[in-house]
Amino acid sequence: MRQEQRQMHLGVFVLGTGNHVAGWRLPGAADSFQNLSVAQQIARTAERGLFDLLFLGDGLSADPNAHPSFTARFEPITMLAALAATTTHVGLGATASTTYAEPYTVARLFASLDHLSGGRAAWNAVTTSGGQAAANFGRQHPPHGQRYEVAEEFIDVVRGLWDCWEDDAIVADRKTGRYIDAAKVHKLHHKGRFFEVEGPLNIGRCPQGQPVILQAGASEPGQEMAARSADVVFSVVQDLDEARAAYAALKERLPRHGRDPGEVAVLPGVMPVIGRTQEEALEKLDHLQSFVNSTNALSMLSNRLGQDMSAYPMDGPVPDLPLPDTSHGFARTMLAKARREGMTLRDLYNLTAAARGHWVICGTPASIADTLEEWFLGGAADGFNILPPYFPGGFDEFVDGVVPELQRRGLFRRAYRGRKLRDHLGLSRPARQHGTPT
């Protein structure tokens, strides 16, 4: 029997003002992340492009000098619930913090979204790297290692709560008047180091069994958490060889947790800048970069590297900095690129303004498809998280130009094979494993 060709998974990272820090300044580009019609248009395009997933990040503080979509945006589950009503297939993923939320609340939110969407919900479990959020919750920001210790237990509790109901617990028998079979609803009885949660959750078992879990940590504890719990891992990349090594290292961890390497999809973030020619694409990127100013880009660079970079000369070498207590992935990848290519701090500043530290590729639809194919077939990715520099045009160019190229090469689907996110990702429905009878 002929073996079916492996195909890419594609997600779109949605920031309403574009992933480029100044993408909103282009004529015709969306200029708000507080506009539902913009999000609905992006979602329609994602389904037209047969994308696996539409993803919304989140933050719990505001900096007027940061990326516009980081400063003014809807709460993501609220937005995704609205999008669930106007979409039919694309997965709907959002961030929720394991540091500044409660497991019961997060379990209930994503179970609700999974029901509302017919089985398309995904939770990006993040530890919240930036300490600015702490003041909004009256807390001290925990150190990096402790945040991951909390996150491990947090995920276990959420998954346990999702398992408290058996699939057929809701009987709704009009003749007998019995609505719920109490023997099929279970308590969790969790008592751990950080959380005590009795359960059960007050919502029936999810259409997917459990929503998909996303993860993006690149530190040692982040990678271990991904290997143990994640279904999809977002990665930060700049170099093919480094990406291959990181991909292989994560896949090698999975058997230690009783998991097959094919159970976890690794999706590097990439910003494609697309033109009819290579020259046109480069001109488009130059035009975007011309909008960058010292305030917005420097704020983003300082955030990624975990310290105020205004004290260093912009045209001097990138200083030798330790990994911050915030996000290891961005800092490690960006500093490695700077050392590898002999970059100045201004070079790194411009890179951060372009895609917030993510990989940027410029070219025609065919040349961009060539690059994605090389990474996909070369052991560096299972697909990609696409970061359009601006909406809607930057995303339309990818869907209408690059997606058909990938389809012609047999590297991407021509139709959805199901309606649930797990169908798109080729993941089985997890069996219920937690809970004790009430």
Image (cartoon, rainbow, N blue to C red):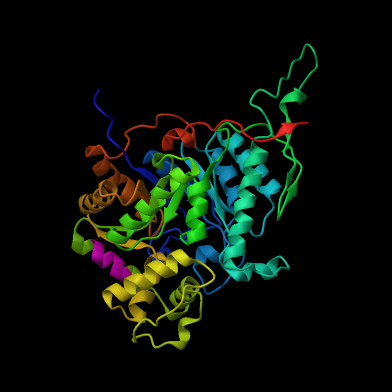
Visible residue check, residue 402: yes
In-image side of 261 versus 65 (left or right): left
> Most extreme residue toward the top, as rendered?
175
Predominant secondary structure in magenta?
helix
- Residue 81 placement (x, y as % from top left): 59, 43
| Residue bounds of the magenta highlight | 281-287
Using the rendered view, name the quadrant where residue 112 is placed.
Answer: top right
**Relative height, residue 242 to residue 38 (above, below):** below
Q: Is residue 377 magenta?
A: no
Q: Residue 225: horizontal and vertical position, in percent? A: 52, 52
- Residue 53: which quarter of the image? top left
The reply to whether residue 39 is visible in this rendering is no
In the picture, measured across the screen, residue 279 lies left or right of residue 424, that is left
Q: Which residue is drawn at 59% across and 56% down?
A: 74
Is 134 situated left or right of 370 in this image? right
Q: Look at the image and say whether residue 284 sits in the magenta stretch.
A: yes
101 relative position to 63: left or right: right
